[in-house]
Image (tube, rainbow, N blue to C red):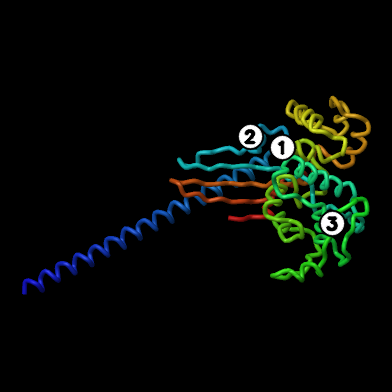
Amino acid sequence: MLIVVLYMVVLLGVILFGFNYTSRMQLHNVDRLRKSVWALNCARAGLNIAIAVIRDTGDVQMNKMLPILSSGGKTFDVCGKVCSLEIIEENGKLNVNMLKNKNGRLNRTAIEQLLRLIDLLNQEHADYSYISYNLVPSIIDWTDGDDKVTHLSFVESENSGAESAYYEQLSPSCKCKNSLLDTIEELLLVRAMTPEIFERMRDYITVYGNGRININCASKRVIQCLSEKMDAALAQVIIDRRKIKPFESVAELRDVAGMTDSIYNTIKQTVTVSSVEGYYNVTSRGSVDGLDYSIDATLRKNTKTKSVEVILYKE
């Protein structure tokens, strides 16, 4: 009888221990879920802050908040929790959807700018994987509407693109898209593009805008891509000048120290100081007790109507 009682006590102990463990795990999971939802709401709050800043700013280059948000981001307190926010202007990047014009002809200016970016990245990062010129005609073939392989006659080597005949031989196979890129990540499907190369290029290229580069928000490297005669020193002078006061007209570039008529005449048709539509990439992260939640969104602002549209959203 005593053995039976002891057995029952042990059994009840095991059951109670199991129940207690299960209850604690469920409470832990509920607490993690609560914190995750809180972190998500913090991230959403950050996105709404970004929308408000962009919407309510007449001239984004003169806004005191945007330079802070664009240079490494800013951290906010949201109900005692942390939200970090970064806004990047897409209008200051090279548009890889503009390598052909509306008539289907090669846009040599845009092509040469992208080739110069490849040169700069290869020169400055010799220890990384080499970026082939073949990437440029391959992007053209991926985005144009025909099945004819592009050959860049003005490039001496590595000047061939790829159409469906190439992609159908891959595993898994696919067809060439033959239409414009919807997101920059689609470039990972293009011949000669690798994840490593993509990470090196992504800060300097975009799929948004009309192809004209906003000189008031372009990076030093993108400014160097504008002309083969544009060196790093002149690009830095342009950046230093706009920090004092953003350019109000393209003609003001004439007054920049080191700017020659030759360089100015080369770039004046490819740059702008403002855009009818502004594109912004927003990264908002909410953090609650070590749990993080991130939102990536692309916003488009119509400067005439002051409306802001979310055109891409990813949690």
Q: Amino acid at mark 3?
A: Pro
Query: Residue sitting at 77 percent across and 44 percent down?
Result: 304
Q: Position of residue 60 (x, y in %)?
A: 72, 37
**Is residue 103 rendered to the left or right of residue 44?**
right
Q: Secondary structure at mark 1?
A: loop
Which of pointers 3 and 1 indicates the residue nearer the eye? Answer: 3
Say above or below: 10 vs 66.
Answer: below
Dot 3 or dot 1: first in sequence order is 1
Decide if residue 237 is on the left or right side of residue 88.
right
CA distance for labels 3 and 1: 35 Å
Q: Quadrant of residue 57?
A: top right
Instruction: Give the residue pinned by disc 2.
Output: 68
| Residue that numbered label 3 is attached to | 137
| Amino acid residing under circle 1 | Val
Which circle marks residue 60 in the picture?
Answer: 1
Q: Which residue is at the front of the view, 121 or 254?
A: 121
The answer to whether residue 276 is seen in the rendering is no
Q: Is residue 200 above or below residue 30?
A: above
Where residue 210 appears, as percent x and y from the top left, is 82, 49
Q: Would you identify the image quadrant in which residue 149 lies?
A: bottom right
Task: Single out the mark in the foreground, 2 or 3.
Answer: 3
Residue 135 appears anywhere in the view? yes
Secondary-structure class at tag 2: helix
Q: Using the image as rendered, state which of residue 13 and residue 46 is in the foreground.
A: 13
Q: Earlier in the sequence, mark 1 or mark 2?
A: 1
In percent of width and height, residue 295 lies at 58, 51
Local secondary structure at mark 3: helix
